């Protein structure tokens, strides 16, 4: 009888301890943290009379209710070298180019589905030409200490020349920007629509083409296999006919559709480039516009 009583008491005691353990609240994180979801960019936006890009970030923060903080975006060359500020407008305390958005979460956790930061192009403080850049995106305390690194985001930017570069024939062109809509279906084929904005000079009535040649990351051409999207040298290329009616002539959005199947690649992920030029009808170069890097994964 004593053994039974002891067993029942032991069981009751275990049940009490188990209930107490279940009732314990979940432990809060020892320090604030954040998790990254995605980043996307609207280019060629005008805000406050300045032309630039609006950078959107989606992320989630934990343990930060009421904590004064910033979303910080530092601008760098692709190798991580910081762009240095020239005027103290969009700058980090270390003198580099940066943009910020104030944060003070009212919940824990707090979800930021679209936190937008505007960055004027002229605040990148770059020389004319094409630049391969990246954004270093962090959540930081108000005093500047790091809470969480969110992501790196690569992008290309071309700073226009003040004046067009003249060729020997007098025809010229200046590049503005290139952007891509991926996973578009056109004519029953899946591919990408490549948009190019540029300006031409001395070309009124001149038969010409916008030409995009596709290359590997080392600059070697992708070679065509079926003669559909092909350059005369046998490489993969896409073209749009041009015959400007004005001088100068502005092409704000000249689109070219490129089916994925025409890239003629093996399955896997490929690091590629588009070599974009304005050429005469006979193939002679008028002006090189830009090199644009992208990745394509063939299933």
Image (cartoon, rainbow, N blue to C red):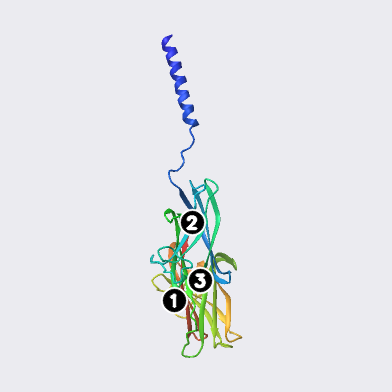
Location of mark 3 (residue): 121
Spot occupied by residue 243 in the image (x, y as percentages of width and height): 58, 84
Question: In the shown orientation, is residue 31 left or right of residue 240?
Answer: left
* Labels 3 and 2: the sequence-earlier one: 2
CA gap, disc 3 to disc 2? 21 Å
- Residue at (50% x, 70% y) in the render: 262
The outermost residue toward the bottom is: 169
For the residues bearing labels 3 and 1, Cβ distance under 8 angstroms: no
- Viewport quadrant of the N terminus: top left
Q: Is residue 248 visible to the viewer in this orientation of the structure?
A: yes
The outermost residue toward the top is: 1
- Residue at (49% x, 61% y) in the render: 100
Disc 1 is placed on an element classified as loop
* Labels 3 and 1: the sequence-earlier one: 3
Disc 2 is placed on an element classified as strand
For the residues bearing labels 2 and 1, Cβ distance under 8 angstroms: no
Spot occupied by residue 150 in the image (x, y as percentages of width and height): 45, 56
Q: On screen, 70 above or below 240?
A: above
Location of mark 2 (residue): 70
Q: Which corner quadrant of the image does residue 201 belong to? A: bottom right
Which numbered disc, 3 or 2, marks the residue closer to the eye?
2
Spot occupied by residue 134 in the image (x, y as percentages of width and height): 44, 65
Which numbered disc, 2 or 1, marks the residue closer to the eye?
2
The circle drawn on residue 127 is 1
The circle drawn on residue 231 is none
Spot occupied by residue 292 in the image (x, y as percentages of width and height): 47, 71
- Residue at (59% x, 84% y) in the render: 244
Question: In the shown orientation, is residue 4 left or right of residue 180?
Answer: left
Q: How would you rate the neighbour count of disc 1 (Cα within 10 Å): few for under 14, some for 14-19, many for 20 or more?
A: few
């Amino acid at each position: 009888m004593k053994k039974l009583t002891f067993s029942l008491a032991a069981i009751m005691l275990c049940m009490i301890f188990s209930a107490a353990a279940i009732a314990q609240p979940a432990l809060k994180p020892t320090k604030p943290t954040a998790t990254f979801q995605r980043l996307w960019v609207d280019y060629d936006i005008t805000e406050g009379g300045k032309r630039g890009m609006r950078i959107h970030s989606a992320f989630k923060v934990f343990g930060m209710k009421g904590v004064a903080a910033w979303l910080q975006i530092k601008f760098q060359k692709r190798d991580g070298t910081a762009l240095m500020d020239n005027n103290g407008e969009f700058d980090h305390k270390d003198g580099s180019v940066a943009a910020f958005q104030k944060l003070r979460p009212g919940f824990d956790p707090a979800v930021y589905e679209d936190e937008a930061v505007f960055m004027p192009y002229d605040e990148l403080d770059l020389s004319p030409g094409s630049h391969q850049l990246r954004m270093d995106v962090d959540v930081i305390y108000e005093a500047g200490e790091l809470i969480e690194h969110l992501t790196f985001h690569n992008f290309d930017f071309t700073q226009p020349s003040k004046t067009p570069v003249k060729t020997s024939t007098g025809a010229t062109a200046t590049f503005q920007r290139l952007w891509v809509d991926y996973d578009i279906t056109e004519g029953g084929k899946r591919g990408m629509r490549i948009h190019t904005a540029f300006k031409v000079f001395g070309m009124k009535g001149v038969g010409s083409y916008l030409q995009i040649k596709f290359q590997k990351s080392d600059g070697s051409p992708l070679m065509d296999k079926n003669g559909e999207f092909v350059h005369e040298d046998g490489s993969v290329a896409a073209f749009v006919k041009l015959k400007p009616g004005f001088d100068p002539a502005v092409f704000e959005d000249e689109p070219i559709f490129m089916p994925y199947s025409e890239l003629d690649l093996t399955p896997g992920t490929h690091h590629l480039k588009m070599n974009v030029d304005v050429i005469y009808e006979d193939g002679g170069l008028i002006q090189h516009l830009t090199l644009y890097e992208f990745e394509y994964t063939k299933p």
